[in-house]
């Protein structure tokens, strides 16, 4: 059985039952069986919209939370809302709505996060039932059964953080009774990598997390080899395993694994049928094109405490290139490297003791995210040199693992000349969460939210911000239409023959009917447009990525 890493999921309607250990993931939107849509805005609001008839959306109510809203869960009428930059370095909680998402200055890294429980039974008058301070910055979370697992980054300056100590911390909370949410346990993981100019900011200590119902894999960056690239036996990646099988939330530290390169993305790790598969490369993030070749490594998880190495192979590259994207799909794996063109490598993992590199496909630009669709792949890519737009969607035939074929590619979006600007301002999410925004629906419709607010000089009503729709049918992929949406579109989903788009400022519904496809039917305001801050200029330590590593914001969680 495979866990997590299954994108294109609809907004959750699930409310866990009393005895399950179901795994659920937070998002900025949730829905319920009454036709209500719950939506978060970076401007500091949480809104409830009546979407039972998407042609007539109605705002039922909204409230504000402290700091910058991150993501939330819904459990019945209660919302578990998480926000960053909500608590000052002195430990005082900011007033709800205070200084949410300032765009003129970088965020204050000494601020901490907050978990707020909201009673939304009466959306017109939502009630705050409780709150808990989470020192540092929330990176990701999961609810398993009645336990909330929160991964946070602590940089040594935040409130209640150990001074001069940087680490990733996993904290558990009992959420069986949300009116009395309480901390249960906590484990911290530091890296022995030196956080200096040789690494992108935060890469030395931020970790990536993958969850199963019984385990957390906490991957990161070990110290890099001071001898340079001559000895490729040095392992730059580390993975710590946590046992989360205790239904009350107590944690047990398990195996500590060393892998070839740093684990900077949720997609680099995957457990299927008791086998952990990892793709990594030395030098990624601190060099433009990595060092040596990406390695595929497999481990049999005898238990959380015991991981037995099974197999290993190194990819044969056409030239020295850096690992950008990984995706696993059952007995297959896919890896993207990039220099000036984007090779896609197909991996045969049928025998985990002998992973095999099969075919490869070269394309311009590089694919940021991959969605397996049977014998095909749908990839969301970026290409700063494409005159038709810096974003694209590709359809790839992988039925013959030895000979993948590009069937179609459609480009769109603004012309943006640098990768880090595309990632920071045009796409709605980092690589860790892009699967929540990039959606492929059962009817073959593909939706890509994109924002031109920054590229247009701060125009929150830019005609180029919206949802790019494409149609996927058989071996064909075609642009279907563009739905303009104000205020940085972040999500889109199908509902009753309508496409409902959610941005920081609006929820807007468009008809998907044959006679009036793409016609706007209704719109409500849920918050304010947040103009993205200007991305930092590339530096020698950024390697052209403007402060991000190749996978997102220097660390990730799954």
Image (cartoon, helix red, strand yellow):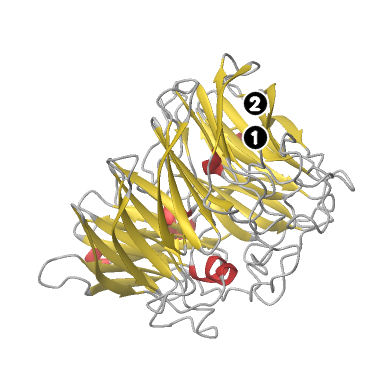
Left or right relative to 12: residue 97: right
Q: Name the residue under label 2.
A: 242
* Residue at disc 1, secondary structure: strand
* Residue at disc 2, secondary structure: strand
How many numbered circles does the render carry? 2
Residue, far left: 515
Q: Do the residues labelled 1 and 2 touch (CB within 8 Å)?
A: yes
Alpha carbon distance from label 1 to label 2: 8 Å
Q: Residue 164: x, y in percent?
A: 89, 48
The answer to whether one can see residue 383 in this image is yes
Query: Mark 1 or mark 2, which has the lower sequence index?
Result: 1
Q: Quadrant of the N terminus?
A: top left
Q: Which of 16 and 144 is in front in this view?
A: 144
Tell me the residue at 70%/56% (across/down): 287
Left or right relative to 161: residue 477: left
Q: Residue 453: x, y in percent?
A: 50, 78
Tell me the residue at 57%/20% (across/down): 245
Q: Mark 1 points at which residue?
A: 218
Relative height, residue 493 to residue 307 (above, below): below
- Graded by Cα atoms within 10 Å as few (under 14), some (14 to 19) or many (20 or more), the crowding at tag 1 reads many
The picture quadrant where one finds residue 541 is bottom right
Q: Residue 174: x, y in percent?
A: 60, 30
């Amino acid at each position: 059985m495979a866990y997590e890493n299954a994108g294109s999921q609809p907004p959750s309607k699930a409310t866990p039952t009393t005895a399950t250990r179901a795994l659920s993931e937070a998002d900025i939107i949730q829905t319920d069986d009454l036709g209500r849509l719950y939506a978060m805005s970076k401007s500091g609001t949480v809104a409830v919209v009546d979407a039972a008839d998407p042609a007539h959306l109605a705002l039922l109510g909204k409230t504000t939370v402290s700091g910058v809203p991150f993501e939330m869960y819904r459990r019945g009428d209660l919302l578990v809302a998480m926000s960053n930059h909500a608590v000052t370095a002195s430990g005082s909680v900011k007033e709800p709505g205070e200084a949410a998402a300032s765009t003129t200055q970088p965020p204050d890294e000494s601020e901490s996060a907050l978990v707020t429980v909201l009673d939304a039974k009466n959306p017109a008058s939502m009630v705050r039932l409780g709150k808990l301070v989470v020192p540092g910055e929330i990176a990701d979370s999961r609810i398993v059964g009645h336990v909330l697992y929160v991964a946070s980054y602590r940089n040594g300056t935040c409130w209640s953080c150990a001074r001069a100590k940087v680490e990733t911390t996993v904290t558990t909370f009992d959420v069986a009774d949300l009116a009395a949410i309480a901390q249960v346990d906590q484990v911290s993981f530091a890296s022995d990598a030196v956080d200096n100019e040789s690494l992108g900011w935060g890469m030395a200590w931020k970790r990536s997390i993958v969850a199963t119902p019984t385990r957390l894999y906490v991957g990161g960056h070990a110290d890099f080899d001071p001898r340079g690239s001559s000895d490729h036996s040095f392992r730059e990646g580390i993975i710590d395993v946590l046992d989360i099988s205790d239904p009350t939330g107590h944690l047990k530290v398990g195996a500590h694994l060393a892998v070839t390169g740093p684990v900077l993305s949720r997609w680099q790790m995957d457990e299927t049928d008791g086998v952990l598969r990892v793709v990594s490369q030395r030098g990624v993030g601190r060099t433009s094109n990595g060092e040596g070749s990406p390695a595929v490594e497999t481990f049999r998880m005898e238990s959380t405490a015991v991981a037995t190495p099974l197999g290993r192979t190194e990819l044969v590259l056409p030239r020295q290139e850096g690992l950008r994207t990984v995706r696993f799909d059952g007995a297959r794996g896919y890896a993207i490297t990039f220099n000036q063109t984007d090779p896609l490598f197909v991996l045969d993992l049928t025998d985990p003791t002998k992973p095999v590199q099969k075919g490869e496909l070269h394309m311009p630009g590089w694919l940021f995210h991959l969605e397996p669709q049977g014998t095909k792949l749908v990839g969301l890519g970026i290409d700063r040199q494409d005159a038709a737009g810096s974003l694209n969607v590709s359809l790839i035939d992988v039925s013959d693992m030895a000979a993948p074929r590009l069937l179609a590619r459609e480009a769109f979006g603004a012309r943006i000349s640098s990768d880090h600007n595309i990632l920071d301002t045009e796409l709605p999410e980092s690589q860790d969460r892009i699967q929540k925004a990039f959606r492929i629906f059962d009817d073959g419709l593909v939706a890509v939210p994109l924002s031109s607010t920054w590229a247009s000089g701060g125009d929150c009503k830019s005609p180029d911000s919206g949802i790019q729709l494409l149609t996927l049918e058989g071996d064909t992929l075609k642009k279907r239409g563009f739905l303009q949406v104000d205020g940085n579109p972040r999500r889109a989903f199908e509902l009753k023959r309508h496409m409902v788009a959610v941005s920081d400022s609006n929820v807007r519904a468009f008809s998907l009917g044959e006679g009036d496809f793409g016609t706007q039917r209704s719109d409500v305001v849920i918050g304010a447009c947040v103009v993205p801050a200007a991305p930092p200029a590339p530096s020698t330590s950024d390697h052209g990525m403007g402060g991000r590593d190749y996978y997102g914001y220097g660390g990730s969680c799954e």
